[in-house]
Amino acid sequence: MDMEKWIEQAPVVADLAKAKEVCWVNPKKVPFAGAKDGLTFGPEDIKEASDRLARFAPLLAKIFPETAETNGIIESPLTEIPAMKALLLEKYGADLEGGRLFVKRDSDLAVAGSVKARGGFHDVLKHTEDLALEAGIFTSRDDDPMKLLQPEAIAYFAKHKVQVASTGNLGVSIGMMSAHLGYQAIVHMSADAKQWKKDYLRAHGVTVVEYAGDYGKAITEGRALSDADPDSYFVDDENSKELFMGYAVAAERMQKQLDDAGVTVDEDHPLFVYIPCGVGGAPGGVTFGLKQLYGDNVHVFFTEPVQACCMVLGMATGLHDQICVQDIGLSGKTHADGLAVGRASKLVGRIMEPLLSGEATLEDAKIYEYMRDLYGSEGIFIEPSSCAAFEGPVKLAKAAEFKAYLYENGLADKMKNASHIAWATGGKLVPEDVRKAFMETYL
Ligand SMILES: *Cc1c(COP(=O)(O)O)cnc(C)c1O
C-alpha cells in the first residue's frame, strides 16, 4: 500500500493523514549560497517583473482611479502589532521574547484586496504586452502602455479572452485586471469560493463559471476550455512563471519598509516570515524574493489547514504535484477558502525544496480566533484564510520541532533581536455583513 511507503519516507504523513496539526521542518533546506545557482529562476527574473509593473503603473493609475494616489503602484503597508504580540503571549503562551511582530497587509492591496494583486496583475500585463507586440500596437516591450487605451487597441483586446480558475481571490485579481483592460474575462470558480466574490466579479463584467467540485476540477476544466480557444489565454496557477515572479516583487518593496521601520536583518537579527499557503504560488514567490535579498537570515514558514495541507504533503514525500490530500484520506475541505487546495503547484514545491524552513498546519477553528484576536487587539480586519499566518509565530515559540530548528541553526539566543512578519494575504473587499458573520463564527 502506498500509504505505508509514504509514511516510511516521511513520518509526518502519518499525522497529516489523521488531520492532526503538525510542525514540519524541511530536511532538504540548504544554505542559500548552495541553493541559489540550482534554482530555475534568478534575480533577473524578478527584476523583469518589477520593471514591468513599474512600466504599466501609469496605465493602472488611469484604469483604477483608486491607485492614482500611488501613481499606479499597488503596494501594502507593513504594520507593527505590539498588542497582538502581547496577546499571543498572554492567550497562547507564545513568547516572542524581545522580537518585534509585524503584519504585512496585502489584505489592503488596492483593486484585488489580496496577495493575488501582484502576481495576478503581472501575469495579465505580461500577456497583454505579448499580444500588443504581436498586433503591432507596441513596437517594443517598453512602448508606452497608454497606447492600450486607443480605440483600436480596445477593439483588439475585446476579441480576446483571459481565463483563470480560482478559489476566489485569484479570480478577483485576474478578473478585475483583464476586464479593465478590455478582455472578455472568464473565471472558473471552485465550490469553495465565496458568493460575494462571484457577485463582485459579475458586477465588474466578468463571466463567472461555477463548479460543484473542488479547485482541482475547476482548474482542469477551465484550462481545457481555454486551450480549445485560440483567442484565449489561461492564467495557470499551477505552473505560471509570470504569477510567481509578480509575487516575488513583494520582497524588494518590503525591504524598504523594513528599513523605514528600523528593522535590521543580518546574522544576529533573524527575520521570520509566516505565509498561508494554498497551491503555493503566492507564498512561494514571496519566499523566492525574500531569499534573494536576505539569504540565510530570513526563515520562511508556510501554514496550511489540516484538511488541505497539499504543500507539506508534496514537499515531505518529495512527490509535489504527484500526490494530493485525498490520496491520504483527507477531504480538502476547509473554512479557509483561499487555502482550499488539495494538490500543490507543479512549479513551486521543487523551487521551495532548498529554501523553505518548514510548515505548520492548523485546525479551522483557529483562523476565526486569530481573526478576532487581531481585530480586538489592533483594530485590523483580515479574512479568515489569511489568519492562518498567526499559527506560525505561535508554533515557532512553542513547538518542540521548531525549537529544535532554532537551536540547530544557532538562532535560539538571537530571538530577542528577531523580527516576525505574519503575511496577511487578503481581506479588504470582504463586505460588511460577511465580516460580521465571520466575527460570530465559532467552530
Ligand atoms: C491565494 C491565497 C493564499 C495562498 O496563495 P497560493 O498561491 O494559493 O498558495 C493565501 N491566502 C489567501 C487569502 C489567498 O487568497
Image (cartoon, grey):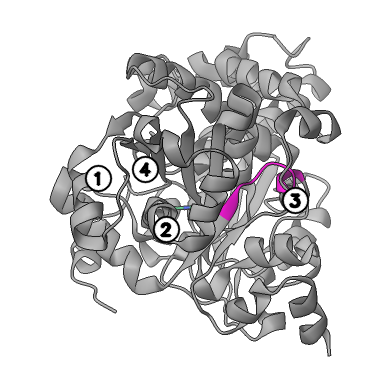
Q: Which residue is mark 4?
A: 107
Q: Secondary structure at mark 3?
A: loop
Calculate the distance from the C-alpha at mark 2 to the C-alpha at mark 3.
Answer: 20 Å
Specify the amino acid type for callout 2.
Answer: Lys
Report the front residue among 192 and 46. 46
Q: Which residue is mark 3?
A: 28
Earlier sequence position, callout 3 versus callout 4: 3
Q: Which residues are magenta?
A: 351-358
Specify the amino acid type for callout 1.
Answer: Lys
Is the shortest distance between ligand 1 and the CB of mark 4 under 8 Å?
yes
Asked if the magenta segment contains residue 217, the reply would be no
Q: Give the overall secondary structure of the magenta segment.
A: loop
Q: Which mark is residue 85?
A: 1
Calculate the distance from the C-alpha at mark 1 to the C-alpha at mark 3.
Answer: 31 Å
Q: Which mark is residue 395?
A: 2
Q: Are marks 1 and 2 in contact (CB under 8 Å)?
A: no
Q: Is residue 257 visible?
A: yes
